[in-house]
Image (cartoon, rainbow, N blue to C red):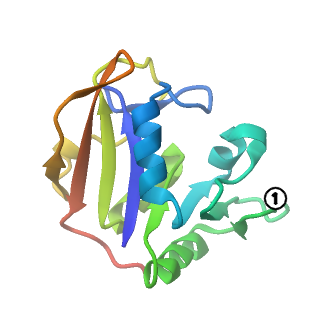
Amino acid sequence: MIYQILNCDVKYGIGKKNGLLFRLPLDMAFFKEKTLGHVVCMGENTLLSFPKSKPLKDRHNVVLSQDPTHNYEEVENVHDFLGFLRMMKHYSLKDDVFVIGGASIYRQTLPYVDGVYLTKVNKDGEAEVFYTNLDENPSFELVEEGEEIMDGDIPIRFTFYKNIAKKEIE
């Protein structure tokens, strides 16, 4: 299965200045629980936003960089989007694959995912980068919605959307 996993603010904002909008320990624990031991796929900027630009531990990291001279250590490097999609499909045959950003990768891979783990943050993070409003997207159906809980002093809600019009990767 192929999933996207992320959080968004009340305006579906997901980032600013190539970083996260909020520090959310419960959401980070949820992210880790879901992705640990699996495949994570991301764009180059997402990798570069990590501490010391190092890949996530205890996961197989796949990174798309459009620049063929950009090859990072300890990750599987891919240099074209079709190859990136095919890599996701290949790994999804035997493991769960999680798309973890950034915005362009989310937008381009959305039609091909089985579902989206979306943590909704009930706060405006003054984002510069936005995600698709899945509640207004006819291809997605909200199938799980948790109770609102406090993550520190910020209210959040864990949700899961199923892609009911998934496109197959060729």
Depth check, front residue: 4 or 105:
4
Percent of width and height locating residue 19: 59, 31
For the N terminus, give its image quadrant: bottom left
* Left or right position of 48 against 18: right
Percent of width and height locating residue 168: 35, 79
Percent of width and height locating residue 20: 53, 30
For the C terminus, give its image quadrant: bottom left
What residue is pinned by disc 1?
Answer: 70
* Left or right position of 17 against 79: left
Residue shown at 27% from the left, 41% from the top: 158
Q: Quadrant of residue 27?
A: top left
Whether residue 130 is visible, yes or no, is no
Which residue type carries mark 1?
His
Q: Quadrant of residue 17?
A: top right
User: In the rendered image of this protein, does residue 88 appear above or below residue 139?
Assistant: below
* Left or right position of 71 against 149: right
Residue shown at 80% from the left, 65% from the top: 68
Total labels drawn: 1
Residue shown at 44% from the left, 53% from the top: 33
User: In the rendered image of this protein, does residue 36 appear above or below residue 32?
Assistant: below
User: In the rendered image of this protein, does residue 134 appear above or below residue 129?
Assistant: below
Whether residue 123 is visible, yes or no, is yes
* Left or right position of 90 against 136: right
Percent of width and height locating residue 100: 50, 52
Residue shown at 43% from the left, 84% from the top: 93
Q: Quadrant of residue 43?
A: bottom right
Q: Residue furthest right?
A: 69
Depth check, front residue: 10 or 51:
51
Q: Residues within 10 Å of mark 1 (few under 14, many from 20)?
A: few
Helix, strand or loop at mark 1: loop
